[in-house]
Image (cartoon, helix red, strand yellow):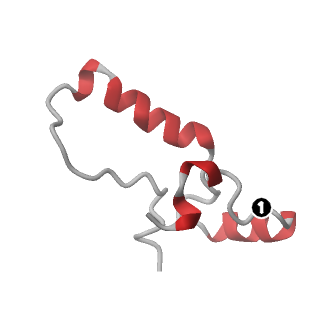
Amino acid sequence: MRGDRGPENIGAAFTANPADAAFRGQKAALGRLRRPKDIADVIASLMSDAARFITGGGIMADGAAMAAP
Protein backbone atom coordinates (compact mmCIF):
# COMPACT_ATOMS: atom_id res chain seq x y z
CA MET A 1 0.00 0.00 0.00
CA ARG A 2 1.35 3.40 -0.89
CA GLY A 3 2.05 5.58 2.12
CA ASP A 4 -0.37 8.32 1.03
CA ARG A 5 -3.25 5.84 0.67
CA GLY A 6 -3.37 4.54 4.24
CA PRO A 7 -6.34 5.11 6.53
CA GLU A 8 -4.43 7.63 8.61
CA ASN A 9 -4.24 9.94 5.59
CA ILE A 10 -7.80 9.84 4.31
CA GLY A 11 -8.85 13.42 3.89
CA ALA A 12 -5.41 14.64 4.93
CA ALA A 13 -3.53 14.12 1.69
CA PHE A 14 -2.81 17.36 -0.15
CA THR A 15 -4.64 19.49 2.41
CA ALA A 16 -1.70 21.20 4.10
CA ASN A 17 -2.21 24.07 1.69
CA PRO A 18 -5.94 24.92 1.21
CA ALA A 19 -5.32 26.37 -2.26
CA ASP A 20 -3.53 23.18 -3.31
CA ALA A 21 -6.35 21.05 -1.89
CA ALA A 22 -8.96 23.05 -3.80
CA PHE A 23 -6.93 22.75 -7.02
CA ARG A 24 -6.47 19.00 -6.64
CA GLY A 25 -10.14 18.58 -5.76
CA GLN A 26 -11.19 20.36 -8.94
CA LYS A 27 -8.89 18.15 -11.00
CA ALA A 28 -10.10 14.92 -9.35
CA ALA A 29 -12.31 12.67 -11.45
CA LEU A 30 -15.31 13.22 -9.15
CA GLY A 31 -14.55 16.88 -8.51
CA ARG A 32 -13.36 16.57 -4.91
CA LEU A 33 -10.86 14.77 -2.69
CA ARG A 34 -11.80 11.67 -0.74
CA ARG A 35 -13.41 11.99 2.66
CA PRO A 36 -13.38 9.51 5.56
CA LYS A 37 -17.11 8.91 5.05
CA ASP A 38 -16.44 7.77 1.48
CA ILE A 39 -14.33 4.89 2.75
CA ALA A 40 -16.64 4.21 5.71
CA ASP A 41 -19.57 3.79 3.31
CA VAL A 42 -17.65 1.16 1.32
CA ILE A 43 -16.79 -0.71 4.51
CA ALA A 44 -20.39 -0.55 5.76
CA SER A 45 -21.62 -1.89 2.43
CA LEU A 46 -19.17 -4.80 2.57
CA MET A 47 -20.26 -5.60 6.11
CA SER A 48 -23.95 -5.65 5.19
CA ASP A 49 -26.03 -8.63 4.11
CA ALA A 50 -26.02 -7.18 0.60
CA ALA A 51 -22.37 -8.26 0.30
CA ARG A 52 -22.98 -11.82 1.52
CA PHE A 53 -21.95 -13.36 -1.82
CA ILE A 54 -18.65 -11.44 -2.11
CA THR A 55 -15.87 -13.84 -1.19
CA GLY A 56 -12.79 -11.95 -2.25
CA GLY A 57 -11.28 -9.46 -4.61
CA GLY A 58 -10.11 -5.90 -4.61
CA ILE A 59 -12.42 -2.93 -4.41
CA MET A 60 -11.08 0.41 -5.59
CA ALA A 61 -12.49 3.19 -3.47
CA ASP A 62 -10.44 5.91 -5.08
CA GLY A 63 -13.09 8.16 -6.61
CA ALA A 64 -11.97 7.11 -10.10
CA ALA A 65 -8.44 8.41 -9.51
CA MET A 66 -6.99 5.39 -11.31
CA ALA A 67 -9.17 6.16 -14.33
CA ALA A 68 -8.31 9.85 -14.49
CA PRO A 69 -5.81 10.96 -17.14
- Which residue in the rendered view is the most extreme toward the top? 49
Residue topped by disc 1: 15
Of the pair 54 and 8, the residue shown nearer to us: 8
Tell me what residue is drawn at x 60 percent, y 52 percent.
Answer: 34
**For the residue labelled by badge 1, is the local secondary structure a helix, a strand or a loop?**
loop
Q: Quadrant of residue 25?
A: bottom right
Name the amino acid, label 1.
Thr
Quadrant into which the N terminus falls: bottom left
Residue 33 image point, x, y percent:
64, 57
Residue 2 image point, x, y percent:
49, 67
Q: Is residue 69 above or below residue 50?
A: below
Q: How many marks?
A: 1
Tell me what residue is drawn at x 37 percent, y 55 percent.
Answer: 60
Of the pair 22 and 55, the residue shown nearer to us: 55
- Give the side of residue 40 with respect to residue 45, left or right: right
Tell me what residue is drawn at x 75 percent, y 71 percent.
Answer: 23
Tell me what residue is drawn at x 42 percent, y 69 percent.
Answer: 66
Residue 69 image point, x, y percent:
47, 80
- Which residue in the rendered view is the most extreme toward the bottom? 69
Q: Is residue 52 above or below residue 3?
A: above
Mark 1 Cα-neighbour bin, 10 Å: few <14, some 14–19, many ≥20: some
